[in-house]
Image (spheres, rainbow, N blue to C red):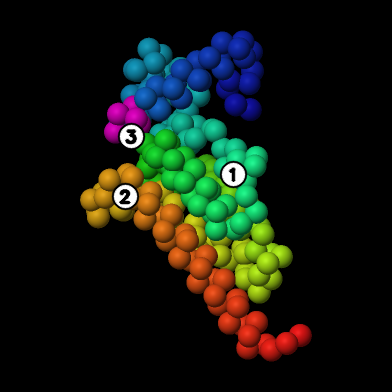
């Protein structure tokens, strides 16, 4: 049973949140905090902090983005799949850059053996992209929407943005434009391939 779920839960919830906030502040400053670092910043004793987070991984897991809406499309999203994908990718890039410090830390941890430690939360990006591509199921039934969504996610996520900024030297605006162009190219290729298959099949 988690420590904070027993006795004086309101106070324990505030203490836990103070540690999470401290971890996020340190992440935003370009650091990857240990539990001791978060405790010091929050003005909480090390002993108390470790009751909430026994190791760095659990602390950083809690500091990951908690604002993950079911959709990144506006309520009045257009029916045109190209326009929908453009809106989605614009919002997705902004989401990644807003939560960049936490996502960078999560990416580093994902490259380490987890052992018996908790897994990092899985994002909703493929679901967001699938929603943007949904009209294809009617207009281009030969396009594998799920496979296309996975391909777009693999080429446009936080990993790609980090590479473009850190290695290629792009500004964040240039990186965002690049992933939007990549998504558009993958969509165009999938649609063209689906139309080629339809022609090869001949008239129904």
Residue depth check, mark 3 versus mark 1: number of the one nearer the observer: 1
Considering only vertical position in the picture, is 33 above or below 120?
A: above
Does 27 appear in magenta?
yes
Task: Tell me the CA gap for discs 2 and 1.
Answer: 22 Å
Q: Which residue is mark 3?
A: 32
Residue depicted at 64% across the width and 18% down the height? 6
Q: Quadrant of residue 182?
A: bottom left
Residue 203 in percent (x, y) is at 73, 87
Residue 100 in percent (x, y) is at 39, 39
Considering only vertical position in the picture, is 34 above or below 142?
A: above
**What secondary structure do most residues of the magenta stretch adopt?**
helix
Span shown in magenta:
26-30
Task: Tell me the CA gap for discs 2 and 3.
Answer: 26 Å
Labels 2 and 1: the sequence-earlier one: 1
Q: Which residue is mark 2?
A: 174
Residue 117 in percent (x, y) is at 49, 43
Residue depth check, mark 2 versus mark 3: number of the one nearer the observer: 2
């Amino acid at each position: 049973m988690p420590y904070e779920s027993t006795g004086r839960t309101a106070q324990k919830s505030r203490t836990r949140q103070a540690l999470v906030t401290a971890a996020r502040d340190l992440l935003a400053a370009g650091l990857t905090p240990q539990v001791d670092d978060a405790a010091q910043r929050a003005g909480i004793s090390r002993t108390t902090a470790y009751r909430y987070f026994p190791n760095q991984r659990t602390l950083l897991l809690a500091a990951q983005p908690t604002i993950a809406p079911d959709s990144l499309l506006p309520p009045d999203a257009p029916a045109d799949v190209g326009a929908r994908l453009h809106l989605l990718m614009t919002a997705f890039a902004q989401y990644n850059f807003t939560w960049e410090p936490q996502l960078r830390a999560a990416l580093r941890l994902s490259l380490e053996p987890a052992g018996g430690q908790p897994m990092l939360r899985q994002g909703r990006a493929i679901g967001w992209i699938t929603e943007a591509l949904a009209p294809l199921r009617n207009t281009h039934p030969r396009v594998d929407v799920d496979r296309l969504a996975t391909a777009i996610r693999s080429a446009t996520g936080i990993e790609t943005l980090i590479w473009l900024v850190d290695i290629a030297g792009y500004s964040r605006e240039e990186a965002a434009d690049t992933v939007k162009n990549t998504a558009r190219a993958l969509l165009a290729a999938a649609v063209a391939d689906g139309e080629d298959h339809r022609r090869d099949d001949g008239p129904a």
